[in-house]
């Protein structure tokens, strides 16, 4: 029916597999393993990096992209947001001391924080995270029924204990009421923590935390529904503690995970 010559047909099935095709077949098994291990969260760049890191395969992104396309594996779309200038200058009460300097040379110098909203059924829950900008590690997180200043205060206290009460610290956030509350500012003053704020209506001044929420939702919380708060909490714990902090390669820290980046830093002291 296809008008293929008989000799061509039999030659196709009797010819030995080429070295390239054999290697592609083996690489595909590695890709499938990583695809499952990292719960479909890897794009071409991170897949290429992890093939080299975990299997010692030095291959290009073009080849990985071709194999992924041939395997028809689902991928997470990423949308780049163009940079924008701050819409308004900070007034006297809300200084932007950070000024988009997102790469401190040491841990526990600059922490970034923000809140996001997560829905379970018809109910909203509120997640506060604090990230050390040095390693991009989530050093504390808290889930609550209320988006109030107490949520931020409890999360900060947790981070402060986890990091052994550091000195010379800057705490950066947006100008949400939870972060401008007198109770939080009093706590930070007592601990000699410098408070820094993003420009009004400018999320790019807090880009590190905003990016974390973007990938948290794309890679975890938007991928399935939750029946109750416990399910959501377990999902956040697995993503933050087991995947993001411990395994996820991060472009800002030489494609290491936050934990690995900090381990290397502290091993050289």
Image: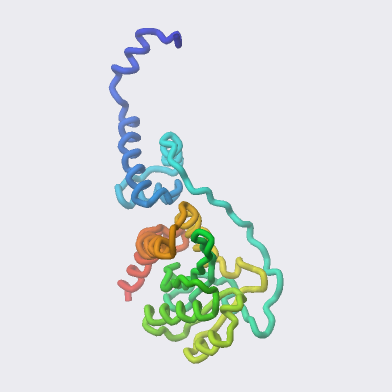
Q: Is 181 placed left or right of 91 in the picture?
A: left
Please identify the residue farthest to the right as the structure is shown: 88
Q: Residue at x 42, y 63 (%)?
A: 236
Q: Position of residue 29 (x, y in %)?
A: 32, 39
Q: Is residue 173 above or below residue 2?
A: below
Of residue 156 and residue 124, the one placed in the foreground of this image is 124
Q: Is residue 22 above or below residue 245?
A: above
Q: Position of residue 21 (x, y in %)?
A: 34, 30
Q: Position of residue 49 (x, y in %)?
A: 39, 51
Q: Is 54 placed left or right of 5 in the picture?
A: left
Q: How is the image coloured?
A: rainbow
Residue 186 in which image quadrant: bottom right
* Quadrant showing the C terminus: bottom left
Whether residue 176 appears in this view of the structure is yes
Q: Residue at x 52, y 74 (%)?
A: 146
Q: Residue at x 49, y 81 (%)?
A: 153
Please identify the residue farthest to the bottom as the structure is shown: 190
Q: Position of residue 109 (x, y in %)?
A: 46, 78
Whether residue 257 appears in this view of the structure is no
* Quadrant showing the N terminus: top left
Q: Residue at x 31, y 18 (%)?
A: 13
Of residue 239 and residue 11, the one placed in the foreground of this image is 239
Total numbered labels placed on residues in the image: 0
Of residue 178 and residue 241, the one placed in the foreground of this image is 178
């Amino acid at each position: 029916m296809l008008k293929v010559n008989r000799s061509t047909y039999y030659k196709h099935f009797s010819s030995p597999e080429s070295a390239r095709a054999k290697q592609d077949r083996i690489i595909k098994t590695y890709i499938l393993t990583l695809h499952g291990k990292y719960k479909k969260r890897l794009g071409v760049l991170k897949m290429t990096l992890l093939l080299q890191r975990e299997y010692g395969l030095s291959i290009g992104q073009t080849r990985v992209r071709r194999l992924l396309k041939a395997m028809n594996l689902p991928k997470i779309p990423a949308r780049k947001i163009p940079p924008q200038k701050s819409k308004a200058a900070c007034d006297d009460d809300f200084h932007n001391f950070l000024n988009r300097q997102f790469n401190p040379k040491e841990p526990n110098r600059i922490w970034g924080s923000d809140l996001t909203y997560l829905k379970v059924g018809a109910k909203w829950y509120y997640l506060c995270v604090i990230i050390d900008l040095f390693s991009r590690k989530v050093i504390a997180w808290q889930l609550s029924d209320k988006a109030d200043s107490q949520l931020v205060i409890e999360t900060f206290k947790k981070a402060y204990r986890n990091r052994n009460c550091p000195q010379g610290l800057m705490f950066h956030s947006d100008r949400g009421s939870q972060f401008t509350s007198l109770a939080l500012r009093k706590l930070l003053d007592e601990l000699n923590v410098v408070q820094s704020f993003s420009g009004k209506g400018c999320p790019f001044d807090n880009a590190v935390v905003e990016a974390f929420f973007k990938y948290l939702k794309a890679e975890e919380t938007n991928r399935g529904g939750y029946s109750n708060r416990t399910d959501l909490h377990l999902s956040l714990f697995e993503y933050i503690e087991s995947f993001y902090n411990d395994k996820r390669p991060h472009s800002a820290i030489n494609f290491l995970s936050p934990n690995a980046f900090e381990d290397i830093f502290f091993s050289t002291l």
